[in-house]
Image (spheres, rainbow, N blue to C red):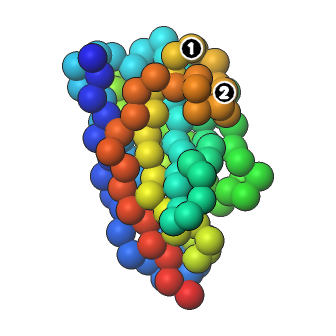
Amino acid sequence: QVQLVESGGGLVQAGGSLRLSCAASGRTILNYAMGWFRQAPGKEREFVAGISWSGGSKDYADSVKGRFTISRDNAKDTVALEMNSLKPEDTAVYYCALGRYGSTRRAAAAFGSWGQGTQVTVSS
């Protein structure tokens, strides 16, 4: 059973940056895609970014493309999300997820383990 723990959330002004980290324990993330999702109050959880097991393929939601960057370190079992040019609409709880497959997917059902989430608040 893998445990995923996110960190790095917080309060930032619009235009600012944050770096989220996710550390896995109990099982290696090697061979599995990783993803970041977010859920804003009153909204459904949505895909933000995904990365294949090797890091060679990355996928981003249109709303964050060009502003967010996902990366992973398989040796350390970590995945990160660098967020720049943050907007108030990026405010949400951000979740790290371990994929069921090696390739990137956008559907939440393609991810089998989830972290507890970290709050990101962007003020205008």
As drawn, the label of residue 41 is: none
> Observer-nearest residue: 93 or 44?
44
Residue 39 in view in this figure: yes
Residue 45 x, y percent position in the rendering: 57, 48
Q: Please tell me which residue is depicted at 65% across the width and 31% down the height of the picture.
A: 107
Q: Name, please, the residue furthest toward the front.
A: 42
Marks 2 and 1 close (CB-CB < 8 Å): yes
Q: Position of residue 25 (x, y in %)?
A: 24, 25
Q: Residue at x 59, y 59 (%)?
A: 43
Q: Number of labelled discs?
A: 2
Specify few, some or many for label 2: CA neighbours under 10 Å numbering under 14, 14-19, or 20 or more: many
Secondary structure of the residue carrying tag 2 is: loop
Q: Callout 2, which amino acid?
A: Arg
Residue type (three-letter) at the residue carrying disc 1: Tyr
Q: Is residue 88 above or below residue 101?
A: below
Answer left or right for 104 relative to 24.
Answer: right
View extreme (bottom): residue: 124
Dot 1 alpha-carbon crowd within 10 angstroms: few under 14, some 14 to 19, many 20 or more: some
Inter-mark Cα distance, 2 to 1: 8 Å
Which label number is shown at residue 105? 2
* In front of the other: 43 or 7: 43
> Do we see residue 79 in this rendering?
no
| Screen quadrant of the N terminus | top left
Q: Which residue is mark 1?
A: 101
Which quarter of the image is occupied by the C terminus?
A: bottom right
Q: Residue at 58% x, 33% y: name it.
A: 108
Please report the residue visible at 44 percent of the width from the left and 77 percent of the height from the top.
Answer: 12
Q: Secondary structure at mark 1?
A: loop
Query: Residue 74 lies in what quarter of the image?
Result: top left
Q: Position of residue 91 (x, y in %)?
A: 52, 68
